[in-house]
Image (cartoon, helix red, strand yellow):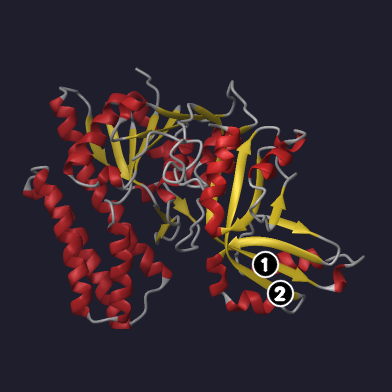
Amino acid sequence: MTEKVIVSKFGGTSMGDAECMKRSALVALNQGAKVVVVSATSGTTNDLIELAKTAEKSSWENASLILTKIKVKHLKIARELEMNPDKIEPINQLCEELESMSRGVHLLKDCSLKALDSIQSIGERLSSILFTEAMNIVLRSQNKPSIAKWFDVRDVLITDNQFSKARPLTDLIKARCQEQLAFIRHSEVVICTQGFIGRTQESMTTTLGRGGSDYSAAILAEGLEADILEIWTDVAGIATTDPRICKDAKAIAEISFKEASELATFGAKILHPATLLPAIRAHIPVFVGSSFQPELGGTWVKKDVEDMPLVRAMAMRKKQILVTLSTPEMLYSHGFLYQIFKVFNDHKVSIDAITTSEISVSLTLDDSTLLNKDLVNDLEKFADVQVEENLALVSLIGNNINHTPGLAKKIFESISDINVRMICLGASKHNFCFIIAEESAAEVINRLHKTFIA
């Protein structure tokens, strides 16, 4: 019998302890998931990064304390799941592998990105073993004939060798998914596997960057030609803005791929910005819901939706800087922007928003780029560089934004007493964004939400 292939991804809070895992497993069962992708247990990735840094720069005794904390945490969940000793053994083996890698880092006093990726991979590898057991417990309790099987995602998720931010090799992934996992459409097996991690063609472990578990699930959904991708978090879908900032934020029943992509890119925390790319390519609808309260429903992200409001949602991204490059050489000359963008490309730095005048160009970046002194030095070879800090990027996401008269008037009337440092409009019909002081950002979001949505 041919069934729908549903790929369900569960985040770290959904893997918090044994009860969370069993709750998530029941959600996956009720949804009919064929592949379940899990993150590391809540807080573990941070612990692993701390372990790597401590092993590199501090005493082994301090590193050993973190190592013990990670091991105890996962063995506790194993006991709560009443796992047999033979099933616990892989957990012990992974902890031994983690200790060996950490000792190597400590002895060399060097933690390369390659080593850090291998160390971080232990989190997902541990949680997926535990979740496989939780899934089987739930399947047995519900008298289901299905069986959950652990699968090493690195066997199919092949990447380049850009450690810490590896790029998936899509064609290879599709081929391997069809070779090794196509059987699930006709099978009672539920595959339990890892997010966030991959492997090079030379068998070196890689990671896709923080937040990469969502991306992993989407890549697998594309490779498997899945019918649905589900992202289960600790909130019931996507809201019109961050509920922690605006108490009047509303749940969104459905949103288009283009709107959701803009929303994720410009600060919404629910989806990793890259998550939607494979789903868009493969036209796979995405559902976002809460594993803690699945009965509340969630948000469908689709190619086409019926309701297309002018303003669907708004997002805010703090810790922004505004870089202004000025030089008379820009006037009536060509090639200046090419030189500037080449500098950013060489330093692998992404630009968010940009505006230009006859002799200057202003652009926004995450403030972490200030740590890259070489970037600023290279820019100063072409222009005078001014940097403004402690800014926030506010974005209104919707439809037909760049062809709607009066929108800007309505926006700026509602925040007339707040200085706007830069405006970016016209490049997308789905987005209007501007830069303001970070301290005013929450107030701006609340006013705009009241004006356009509440």
Residue 388 disc label = none
Please tell me whether mark 2 sits on a helix, a strand or a loop.
Answer: strand
* Residue 32 at least partly seen: no
Name which quarter of the figure residue 449 lies in: top right
| Residue nearest the viewer, comparing 402 with 172 | 402
The residue drawn where x is 61% and y is 62% is 365
Query: How far across and how far down the image is residue 250, in percent?
Result: 46, 32
For disc 2, the marked residue is 385
Q: CA separation, marks 1 and 2?
A: 7 Å
Q: Is residue 185 left or right of residue 425?
A: left
Which class describes the residues within 10 Å of circle 1: few (<14), some (14-19), or many (20+)? some
What's the amino acid at mark 1?
A: Val
Q: Earlier in the sequence, mark 1 or mark 2?
A: 1
Q: Is residue 63 left or right of residue 288?
A: left
Please tell me whether mark 1 sits on a helix, a strand or a loop.
Answer: strand
For disc 1, the marked residue is 323
Query: How far across and how far down the image is residue 256, in percent?
Result: 57, 31
Name which quarter of the figure residue 227 lies in: top left
**Number of labelled discs?**
2
What's the amino acid at mark 2?
A: Val
